[in-house]
Image (tube, grey):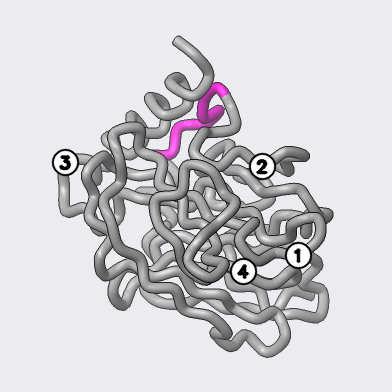
Amino acid sequence: MDGRQSYRRALRASLFLLGIAAAPAHSAVLLSEVFYDASGGDAGQVFVELYGSTGLDLAGYELRGINGSGGDTYKTVALSGLIPADGVFVVADDDGGSTAVPDADLLADVDFQNGPDSIELWDGGMVIDALGYGDFTSAVFAGQGDPAPDVSAGQSLARVSVTGSNLADFMVLDTPTPGSTAVSAVPVPAAVYLMGSGLALLGSRLRRCT
């Protein structure tokens, strides 16, 4: 079994233990990789990757960009399409009807800002996942736990676990990997954390770091 299969099997097992693989599909998807700062221009180069249950209909889901300066929503991206058999769904930046991102499942304006900023995944009126990246000493953080670092141009942030802290859950990749997972396995079980923490947030949990 290769690394991608191991990762997907482990993450799928964690989702199943939560009961969301067989329950209503509204919580069976997570942010798995974000590439927001390409080397050179971002148009048609950047992407957001999701991981979720095979066949999940993304109609009604949204990605929202939360500005670290003030906490306002500066971008809303409506999602559509079905998550394919491998569980990986790539939302690639739309550059006039085309994109340079391989394995794209949906073209949309996903040129999110550099940090400190956050990206939220919404299902209807509920935030079900969020990633904040950068230094939030004097900025509004809308992610989970502690923020992930703000990557350098050409690097991406890829999920490696589901603990509820962006710093622990995402690693920096020097080479983005749209359409394929970055690590061999989820290192910690997701079920215990998620049941106690409420990963499916009842709205935006904005706070100011000190």
Tag 1 residue: 41
78 or 26, which is in the foreground?
Answer: 78
Q: Residue at x 40, y 47 (%)?
A: 89
Tag 4 residue: 111
The mark lying in front, picked from 2 and 3, is 2
Q: The C terminus is located in which quarter?
A: bottom right
What x and y, as percent, mark residue 51? 41, 44
Please rate how many residues cluster around mark 1, counting C-alpha atoms within 10 Å: few if below 14, some from 14 to 19, many from 20: few
Q: Secondary structure at mark 3?
A: loop
Q: Secondary structure at mark 4?
A: loop
Please rate how many residues cluster around mark 3, counting C-alpha atoms within 10 Å: few if below 14, some from 14 to 19, many from 20: few
The mark lying in front, picked from 3 and 4, is 4
**N-terminal of the two: label 2 or label 4?**
4
Q: Secondary structure at mark 2?
A: loop
130 or 94, which is in the foreground?
Answer: 94
- Give the distance between the C-alpha atoms of the residues marked 2 and 1, in whole angstroms: 16 Å
Does 187 appear in magenta?
A: yes
**N-terminal of the two: label 2 or label 1?**
1
- Give the distance between the C-alpha atoms of the residues marked 2 and 4, in whole angstroms: 15 Å
Tag 3 residue: 22
Q: Is residue 97 above or below residue 208?
A: above
Position of residue 38 in the picture relative to residue 24 (left or right): right
Part of the protein shown in magenta: 184-191
**N-terminal of the two: label 4 or label 1?**
1
What x and y, as percent, mark residue 103? 47, 42
Tag 2 residue: 176
**N-terminal of the two: label 2 or label 3?**
3
Residue type beneath disc 2: Pro
Mark 4 and mark 1 residues within 8 Å of each other at the beta carbon: no
